[in-house]
Each structure stands twice: as structure tokens, then as C-alpha cells.
């Protein structure tokens, strides 16, 4: 059996952490399994390299930046091989050239096109643990190209598919997805099973456990993701196409406090207004979530939407610069909002879920500004000051704290 294991940079940032991860890999190896390890480089090490480059050139060439960052990915993989050797485990580190990981796309944002597993399989047959540099490949020019944020996760999923492994193990500090943030809901529990779509929705709500691009890859190729604890190695959450637990309605309740509401007031009530507004934002790469359009009055209408807080000022400036083109009267920015999201594949076909959520908020005297729903997600915009209280109310209303992820259908 081939075990593909992926560790974040936070798991291998110190010699002690590196040895702990090596010990987990050694345990699987000694049971007779073949072990392939993918590592992210520690974030502080990557940031140090970025600072070195910036001290020389504030805008380094993208190719050279990738060459620089790839060195730390290779360093981390080599150190893991050294750590395994120290505890008597034969290991070898391989970079993108040696695994013939071919990428397409630009520097810093490449995507994996193919992986030649010949060298990896040869090393596994020789009973070595194989450590692969995560988040990098070789482009059509023969240059190293990094995959950008979440690249190591993508490497792990792609390798799992290429090696015909049934699962891809992702080690995180939390060890899985919880029914809510345990810091907000002391009764929150680990969710044992999620679907790919549920995890994608949780990522979109601001609480990524695994990067969205990796979940998309796993769904496309049918790779089961197993989120494990860095500390104990125990499995926390398993992610696959379908859940075995049919009665689970809501899997998790999340709170995103980085959502700001922008109101475009006094737009002309005529065809094409929404298209002009949102196509302008889309071209600028600004992601919109909740949208509310008012009924027209006196030939005018208002449109409200939410953006992530880091995009708020840029969005306001863009709209102000295009006021004549969009023909609105004024703008309003509210930074005191938060998005509460309840995610669950069990929402499909279960009438009354929205009413239960709204009742929970009503009982707490919490006002709702905006609402959006899908087959597996309900999101409401509320005052940030009410956020944690709202999470606890919805969490309790669906019985998530008393039985992990279960409620009456």
C-alpha cells in the first residue's frame, strides 16, 4: 500500500517538529507500507528569501523568484530525508526535475500537467521513503516554476492519483474540520466525514482546511482526502464524494469577520445596470459574495454586496472612479459586518432548515441584513458584534454540540 502524506511548513519549521513528522512517517514505513511525503517549506523561511530578494530588487523577475523559492522547498525535503536517516529509515529527497513534474502556466502560478512516477516507484521498490518537493514543477522552457499558494497540497493530490493511491493524507494542526470554531463553541466536535462540495463551501466561507484547488483535483480524480492531526497522527475528517452519514444535515457553522458591505445607492433602474457594475469588478479581480438588489423606486435602485476586507478600499476607489459611467448617486461602506455560514450536504431535500436557522437568530435578537443559499449552504450577513453569539445559537439549534454533526431529519 502506498501512503501519500503531506505536511505543512508549520509542521517542519524546527528540528523538533521535523523529527516528530519523521517519526510518524517511520511508523507507517515499519508496518510495510510504501511512504511518499510531500512538504511545504516553512513560511518564515520563504518570507526571509522574499525579503532578501526585495533588498536587492523590489520587483524581482518572476523566473528568478521561482528559482529562489524552489531552493527552500528542496532544502526542506532534504532535511526530512536526513531526519529519517537519523532514526534508521532509508530515505531519498527528489525535486521537480527528478520526478519530472511538468507544469503549464506562468511563474508563481503554474498548474501540474503530468508527473512521471518511474523514479519514485524505483525508490519505493528499493524500500526507501520518498520525499518530494511540494509546490513546484518544470515548465516548457525547462525552468523550475512554483505552483503558488496551496501548491504543496496540489502536488500531494496529483501524486496520489499518479501513484494510484486510494487516499491522500493531509496533516494539519487542528486535525480536521470542526462543527464550529472550538474557541467560540466549547462543545464543537470534529466532523468525521465531509463531501468535496461541503469542504469547498467551507473554504469559500473563510475557513480553508485544504486549499480549494486541491479539493477540486481530488474530486476530479476521486482521491479521498484524510485530514490528520500533526500531534497524534489520528484521522480527523475524511473527505470524499459522498458521506455515509445520511442523517447529517449541517456539518459546520463558520464565521467570517472579514466581510465588508458596500452599497451602491441611486443606480438607474434599467437593463444592464448590474452587468456594468459587476463586470467592472470582475475585470479588476474583485470577488463578490452576497448580493442584494432593491426594488426600483422613482426610477432608481440600490445594490448591496459584500467583499473581503482587504479588497474594500480598492473596490470603493474603483467605483468612485467610474461613477459617471455607472451613474449612481453615492456609495456606502460598512466594515462592521460578518458572514455566518452553515454548510451541509443534508440541506438538500430537508425543508425547514432555513427556518430553524432564522429562528435561532431571532431568539437571540440578532438582525439579518442579507441572505444567500445554495443546495448545501446558507449564509447570512449580520453585525460583527453579534457574530460569536450567533454561531453558538445556530450550532446549538442544529444539535451539533451534543452529537457531532447529527440532528433529526
Image (cartoon, grey):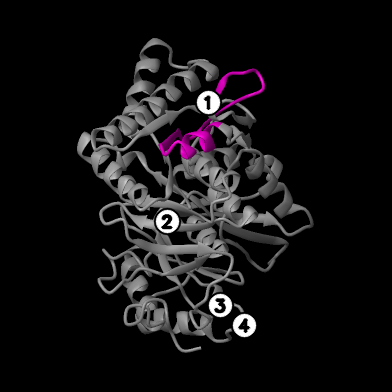
Residues at circles 1 and 3 in contact by the CB criterion of under 8 Å: no
Residues at circles 1 and 4 in contact by the CB criterion of under 8 Å: no
First along the sequence among labels 3 and 2: 2
How far apart are labels 3 and 4 at the CA level?
Answer: 6 Å
Tell which residue pokes out farthest to the front in this image. Answer: 126
First along the sequence among labels 1 and 4: 1
Residue 257 location, quadrant: bottom left
Is 142 in the magenta?
Answer: yes
* In this picture, residue 180 sits left or right of residue 240: left
Packing grade of label 1 (10 A; few <14, some 14-19, many >=20) is some
Residue 363 location, quadrant: bottom left
Q: Which mark is residue 349?
A: 4
Evaluate whether residue 327 shows in this view: no
Is 180 in the magenta?
Answer: no
First along the sequence among labels 2 and 1: 1
Tell which residue pokes out farthest to the left in this image. Answer: 16
Which residue is denoted by mark 2 in the rendering? 207
Which residue is denoted by mark 1 in the rendering? 98
- Residue pictured at 35% horizontal, 30% vertical: 76
Which residue is denoted by mark 3 in the rendering? 347
Packing grade of label 3 (10 A; few <14, some 14-19, many >=20) is many
How far apart are labels 1 and 4 at the CA level?
Answer: 50 Å
SS assignment at label 1: helix
Q: Height in image: 254 above or below 129?
A: below
Evaluate whether residue 199 shows in this view: yes
SS assignment at label 2: loop
Q: Which residues are magenta?
A: 119-144
Packing grade of label 4 (10 A; few <14, some 14-19, many >=20) is few
Amino acid at each position: 500500500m502506498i501512503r501519500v502524506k503531506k505536511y505543512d511548513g508549520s509542521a517542519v519549521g524546527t528540528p523538533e517538529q521535523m523529527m516528530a513528522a519523521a517519526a510518524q512517517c517511520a511508523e507507517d514505513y515499519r508496518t510495510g507500507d510504501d511512504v511518499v511525503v510531500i512538504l511545504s517549506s516553512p513560511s518564515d523561511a520563504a518570507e526571509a528569501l522574499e525579503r532578501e530578494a526585495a533588498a536587492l530588487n523590489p520587483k524581482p523577475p518572476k523566473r528568478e523568484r521561482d528559482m529562489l523559492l524552489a531552493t527552500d522547498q528542496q532544502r526542506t525535503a532534504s532535511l526530512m530525508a536526513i531526519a529519517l536517516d537519523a532514526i534508521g529509515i532509508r530515505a531519498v529527497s527528489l525535486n521537480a526535475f527528478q520526478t519530472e513534474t511538468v507544469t503549464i502556466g506562468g511563474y508563481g502560478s503554474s498548474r501540474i500537467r503530468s508527473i512521471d512516477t518511474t523514479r519514485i516507484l524505483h525508490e519505493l521498490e528499493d524500500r526507501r521513503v520518498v520525499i518530494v518537493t511540494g509546490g513546484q514543477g518544470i515548465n516548457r522552457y525547462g525552468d523550475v516554476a512554483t505552483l503558488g499558494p496551496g501548491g504543496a497540497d496540489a502536488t500531494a493530490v496529483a501524486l496520489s492519483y499518479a501513484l494510484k493511491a486510494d487516499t491522500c493524507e493531509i496533516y494539519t494542526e487542528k486535525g480536521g474540520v470542526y462543527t464550529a470554531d472550538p474557541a467560540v463553541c466549547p462543545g464543537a466536535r470534529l466532523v468525521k466525514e465531509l463531501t468535496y462540495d461541503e469542504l469547498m463551501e467551507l473554504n469559500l466561507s473563510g475557513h480553508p482546511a485544504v486549499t480549494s484547488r486541491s479539493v477540486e483535483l481530488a474530486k476530479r480524480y476521486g482521491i479521498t482526502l484524510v485530514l490528520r492531526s500533526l500531534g497524534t497522527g489520528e484521522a480527523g475528517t475524511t473527505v470524499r464524494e459522498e458521506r455515509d452519514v445520511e442523517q447529517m444535515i449541517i456539518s459546520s457553522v463558520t464565521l467570517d469577520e472579514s466581510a465588508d458591505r458596500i452599497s451602491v445607492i441611486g443606480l438607474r433602474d434599467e437593463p444592464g445596470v448590474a452587468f456594468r457594475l459587476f463586470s467592472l469588478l470582475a475585470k479588476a479581480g474583485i470577488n463578490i459574495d452576497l448580493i442584494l438588489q432593491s426594488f426600483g423606486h422613482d426610477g432608481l435602485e440600490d445594490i448591496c454586496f459584500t467583499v473581503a476586507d482587504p479588497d474594500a478600499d480598492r473596490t470603493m476607489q474603483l467605483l468612485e472612479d467610474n461613477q459617471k459611467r455607472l451613474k449612481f448617486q453615492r456609495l456606502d461602506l460598512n466594515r462592521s459586518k460578518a458572514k455566518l455560514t452553515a454548510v451541509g450536504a443534508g440541506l438538500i431535500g430537508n425543508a425547514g432548515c432555513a427556518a430553524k436557522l432564522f429562528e435561532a437568530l431571532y431568539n437571540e435578537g440578532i438582525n439579518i441584513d442579507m441572505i444567500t443559499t445554495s443546495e448545501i449552504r446558507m449564509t447570512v450577513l449580520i453585525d460583527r458584534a453579534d457574530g460569536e453569539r450567533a454561531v453558538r445559537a445556530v450550532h446549538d439549534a442544529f444539535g451539533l454540540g451534543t452529537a457531532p454533526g447529527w440532528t433529526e431529519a
